[in-house]
């Protein structure tokens, strides 16, 4: 009985063992009791990273992060915001990326760098509040508010708000939009480490209309709900991270037509489809839903 329950619940996966025998595949099993527990309760309670080699496991919305690195709370060209959330963690490639982008931001008129919002928890994984993604240390939210003061105190970083750049529910930008936002998003998307950037549709359409040079970067700018107080950068899986699952790349082309369509649908919502199936309520992720390596990330 117990054996068959174990067999039914056991999850197996191959894992590149760390340390001395990197080529040996290992079978990893999640304990059957653990596999039924809500992952966000466990990952949300972890205050420190695992001591493992840095590696994302799973996908952006169903995974975890071994060996996270912390974005220092303050650098010469950035400040991490909302420190109480303890979400200024990521894969080392994300930490490098954010720092590189902050140096580019510091070149823009009115900007001295970046205010950095949520990245990942110390061991990644699902969160108790907010975000479905941000689970593998490859996602970061960048505030739209120009970072003009990089001496904010902890309490200021809890209480100051970003600024919204949208009007008409995201169909258009508002008066807070500046050419610097275009330049920053262009710099952010032009980095080859980036897979996608999510921003409200009106921003993409505006950049589509105003870009006079290279347009390749626009392909990575994807319209999405929300994302008017911040934009969301998602990196590709790092080279050699075999347990990390990339998304399919964005469709070919600059995506400007689709963004315009999105805007049109905001302005003139299509009638609801009477045959549309009722949305299925979303179940909370359990440990059994995550890659088996995530149990080891928790246990480390
Ligand atoms: Zn985000």
Image (spheres, rainbow, N blue to C red):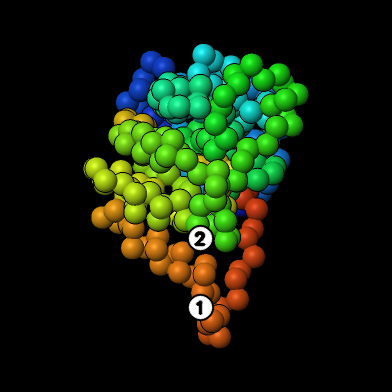
Measuring 69% from the left and 26% from the top, which residue is drawn there? 157
How far apart are labels 1 and 2 at the CA level?
15 Å
Label 2, secondary structure: give it.
loop
154 with respect to 8 (left or right): right
- Front-lying residue, 133 or 80: 80
Q: Which residue is mark 2?
A: 171
> Ligand 1 within 8 A of label 1's CB?
no
- Front-lying residue, 276 or 221: 221
260 in relation to 117, above or below = below
Q: Residues within 10 Å of mark 2 (few under 14, many from 20)?
A: many
Q: Which mark is residue 270?
A: 1
280 in relation to 40, above or below = below
Q: Which mark is residue 226?
A: none
Q: Quadrant of residue 197?
A: top left
194 with respect to 175 (left or right): left
Of the 4 image quadrants, the one containing the C terminus is top right
């Amino acid at each position: 009985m117990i054996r068959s329950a174990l067999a039914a619940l056991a999850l197996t996966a191959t894992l590149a063992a760390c340390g001395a025998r990197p080529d040996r595949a290992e079978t990893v099993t999640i304990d059957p009791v653990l596999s039924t527990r809500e992952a966000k309760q466990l990952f949300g309670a972890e205050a420190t990273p695992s001591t493992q080699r840095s590696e994302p496991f799973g996908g952006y919305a169903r995974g975890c992060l071994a060996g996270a690195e912390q974005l220092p709370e303050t650098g010469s060209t950035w400040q991490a915001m909302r420190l109480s959330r303890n979400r200024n963690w990521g894969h080392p490639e994300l930490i490098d990326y954010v720092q590189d982008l902050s140096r580019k931001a510091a070149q823009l008129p009115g900007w001295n760098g970046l205010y950095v919002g949520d990245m990942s928890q110390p061991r990644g994984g699902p969160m108790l509040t907010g975000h479905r993604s941000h689970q593998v240390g490859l996602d970061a939210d960048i505030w739209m508010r120009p970072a003009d003061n990089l001496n904010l105190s902890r309490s200021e970083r809890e209480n100051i708000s970003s600024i919204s750049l949208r009007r008409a529910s995201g169909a258009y930008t508002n008066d807070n939009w500046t050419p610097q936002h275009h330049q920053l998003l262009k710099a952010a998307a032009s980095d080859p480490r980036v897979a996608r950037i999510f921003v409200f549709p009106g921003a993409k359409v505006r950049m589509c209309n105003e870009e006079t040079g290279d347009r390749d970067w626009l392909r990575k700018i994807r319209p999405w709900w929300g994302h008017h107080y911040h934009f969301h950068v998602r990196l590709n899986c790092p080279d050699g991270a075999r347990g990390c699952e990339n998304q399919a790349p964005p469709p070919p082309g600059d995506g400007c037509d689709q963004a315009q369509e999105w805007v049109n649908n905001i302005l003139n919502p299509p009638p609801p489809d009477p045959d549309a199936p009722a949305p299925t309520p979303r179940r909370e992720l359990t440990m059994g839903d995550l890659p088996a390596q995530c149990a080891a990330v928790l246990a480390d």
